[in-house]
Amino acid sequence: MSDNPYSTAVLAWYETNARDLPWRRPEASAWSILVSEIMLQQTPVVRVLPAWRAWMERWPTPADLAREPSGEAVRMWNRLGYPRRALRLHACAVAVTEEYGGRVPDDHATLLSLPGIGAYTAAAVASFAFGQRHAILDTNVRRVLARAETGIQYPPKTQTKAETALAESLLPPTPSVAARWGVAVMELGALVCTARAPACADCPIAGQCAWRLAGKPAHEGPPRRGQTYAGTDRQVRGKLLAVLRDSVHPVSKDALDVVWDDGVQRERALDALVSDGLVDPLDDGRYALPG
């Protein structure tokens, strides 16, 4: 298969333990896979599943989404968080519709050129939708490879060239197998080699894991702090957007002012939403979703 010392064990584990997710099924379209990858960024599967199903029911193709204003994508995004992803998906749908006849392109370089598509998403869509051979490095994969190969508990905060080179060196040579390996090691990180409580007893490569064999040395880098939400500008932005999502009409400034007592923070959050293109200020002083 390759010089990858883990592929046989990880692929066998995946066959038995993989979650049945709709975007992994053989009938899943490239568009549905692209949508899932954007939604899954910084958001757990349990929250993404209902949002993905609702999104695909309403917009089963890029052209379906492209026909609607971008504000509807923001409204449909609901409470998934990081709502700029909705704008990027809408811009991507418009580009796919106008430039590629409504079909998600299968070329990796072309995928990279689409709005809102970065290196990870391009590799994931090329692999999972089209069975190609690309190194896929999300948080889960980076953690598995850091432990198994490098012998450290957590990968660096910022992805390094060494990580990319390592991931590429472990790719099985057959494209379809490499694509399967990509999703399998990702699933291993999500279900077994988790950040806080790795289940090493259940890991198919525990006997080869450099970190476990070294006695699981503690992380020596900067302290890893969980993201806070309460009281942050993110929370305020979410509350402001919720008012706009819940209204079919533009809303008055008074309706936005009541969601947060700290006026300085509230105005800063509102200004950021306008700057990000998530909120449109109207000439009459009201506010609306874009489009």
Image: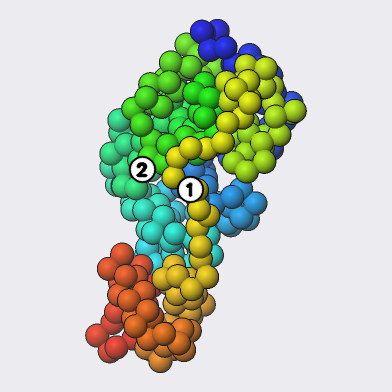
Foreground disc of the pair 1, 2: 1
Regarding residue 163, the answer to whether it shows in the image is yes
**Nearest the camera: 196 or 33?**
196
Apparent side of residue 195 relative to residue 95 in the rendered image (left or right): right
Q: Name which residue type carries label 2.
A: Ile
Name which residue lies at 43% across and 61% down.
Answer: 83
Q: Which residue is mark 2?
A: 117
Name which residue lies at 40% across and 52% down.
Answer: 89
- Give the class, few, some or many, for how many residues have Cα within 10 Å of label 1's Cα (few <14, many ≥20): few
Name which residue lies at 32% across and 36% down.
Answer: 112
Examine the rendered structure and indicate whether residue 147 appears above or below residue 254. Answer: above
Q: Which residue is mark 1?
A: 223
**Nearest the camera: 88 or 275?**
275
Q: Quadrant of residue 177?
A: top right
Horizontal and vertical percent position of residue 67: 38, 58
Examine the rendered structure and indicate whether residue 243 appears above or below residue 19. Answer: below
Name which residue lies at 31% across and 64% down.
Answer: 276
- Give the class, few, some or many, for how many residues have Cα within 10 Å of label 2's Cα (few <14, many ≥20): many
Horizontal and vertical percent position of residue 149: 52, 21
- The disc at residue 151 is none
Q: Quadrant of the N terminus?
A: top right
Apparent side of residue 241 relative to residue 183 in the rendered image (left or right): left
